[in-house]
Amino acid sequence: MLTEEKVREILGEIEDPILHKPLKETGGILEIKVKEEKNHVSVKVAIAKTGTAEQIQMQSNIVNRLKNAGAATVGIRFAQLPDEVIERFRPEGIESEFEKLLKNTAIIAVASGKGGVGKSTVSVNLAVSLARMGRKVGLLDADIYGFSVPDMMGIVDRPVVRGEKIIPVDRFGVKVMSMAFFVEDNSPVIWRGPMLGKMLNNFFREVEWGDLDYLFLDLPPGTGDVALDVHQMLPACKEIIVTTPHPTSAFVAARAGTMALKTNHEILGVIENMSYFESRTTGKKEYVFGKGGGKKLAEELGVPLLGQIPLEQPYWDDEEFAPSVYQIDHPIGKIYFKIAEKIDDLIMEKEKN
């Protein structure tokens, strides 16, 4: 008859298929239950990566060893080891998923000095435009207090959990993750700085982003805790600064740009939103928020003005409702597509160099 001690001894010698260390060293034996009357053994094991072919092989190995030791039936559940344990035992030369993301993905933070300038709208439409170009794109709604991306994109689904990883929602070819998915009834998030940083870290390390060409971060406005965490966590992150043409908006946006430069984040350029309103009847342009703010900010930061986006709402389609996503044939959708092409060219050029 198998005992808990004997099962622990058997499991302890089995190696984690990714870390190549025995479970007794990694602390991967989480639970053992032996039902003597049925001679049934159930175990819970933590490994470095779940949902892989190696896990299936390991499962077969555990079942065979326990049955050879006398178990009639075996039940196994798998969990994922904590990141700090994985980092401690990870073999030299093997990258973590987070390191692969940093190495292989162009991470672009969309920032602004103040709220209300359309930063989230810009983030959403740039991500969708690059996806329309055939790029593999993710979008992280990092505005944890003022999350809005799922609503803007008309997302009604919620992420699912596979193993120990959260699977982002796919919309218009963009993988989306947001705090909005974890809040009921549009409730406010009342957190202090350290909790914000932890949630942001979870979004990077616990979400199954897969292979991406681009990951956009819709940052909160200003230069607060989340922006600081992003600058520390993602040293190679690039930034786009969004402003309106109003002088005050551009003045405040300069702070976000200066913060990026001081933390060695490269600014790809400035986007001026709400540049003007063009009458469909007369074709006359009305400069509702003034002129020149975006150009002046770009000159001050020494970066290009990537584009000027006028005021006009998207065409709304009841079958595929997304209140802030511009269609590819919409005049503003075409502007976003051209800006996305500029960004893609800039990134490709930097990769060559």
Image (cartoon, rainbow, N blue to C red):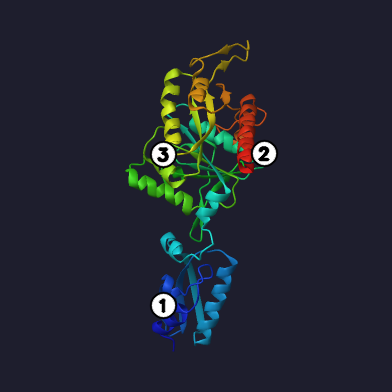
Q: Position of residue 3 (x, y in %)?
A: 41, 85
> Badge 3 is on which residue?
227
Residue occupying image coordinates x 64% and y 42%: 352
> Label 2 crowding class (10 Å Cα cut-off): few <14, some 14-19, many 20+?
few
Q: Name the quadrant of the C terminus.
A: top right
Q: What element carries label 2?
A: loop
> Label 3 crowding class (10 Å Cα cut-off): few <14, some 14-19, many 20+?
many
Circles 3 and 1: CB distance less than 8 Å?
no
Q: What element carries label 3?
A: helix
Q: Position of residue 351 (x, y in %)?
A: 61, 43
In the rendered image, the vertical position of residue 8 relative to residue 127, given as above or below:
below
Query: Which of the two labelled residues, at mark 3 and mark 2, occupies the earlier sequence position?
Result: 2
Whether residue 54 can be seen here? yes
- The type of residue carrying mark 2 is Met
Q: Where is residue 230 in the image (x, y as percent from the top left)?
A: 43, 43
Q: Where is residue 347 in the image (x, y as percent from the top left)?
A: 60, 39
> Badge 2 is on which residue?
133
Q: What element carries label 1?
A: strand
Give the number of the mark in front: 1 or 2.
Answer: 2
Q: How far apart are marks 3 and 1 (CA)?
A: 46 Å
Residue 33: assigned label: 1
- The type of residue carrying mark 1 is Lys
Whether residue 186 can be seen here? no
- The type of residue carrying mark 3 is Ala
Q: Name the quadrant of the N terminus.
A: bottom left
Give the number of the mark in front: 3 or 1.
Answer: 3
> Label 1 crowding class (10 Å Cα cut-off): few <14, some 14-19, many 20+?
some
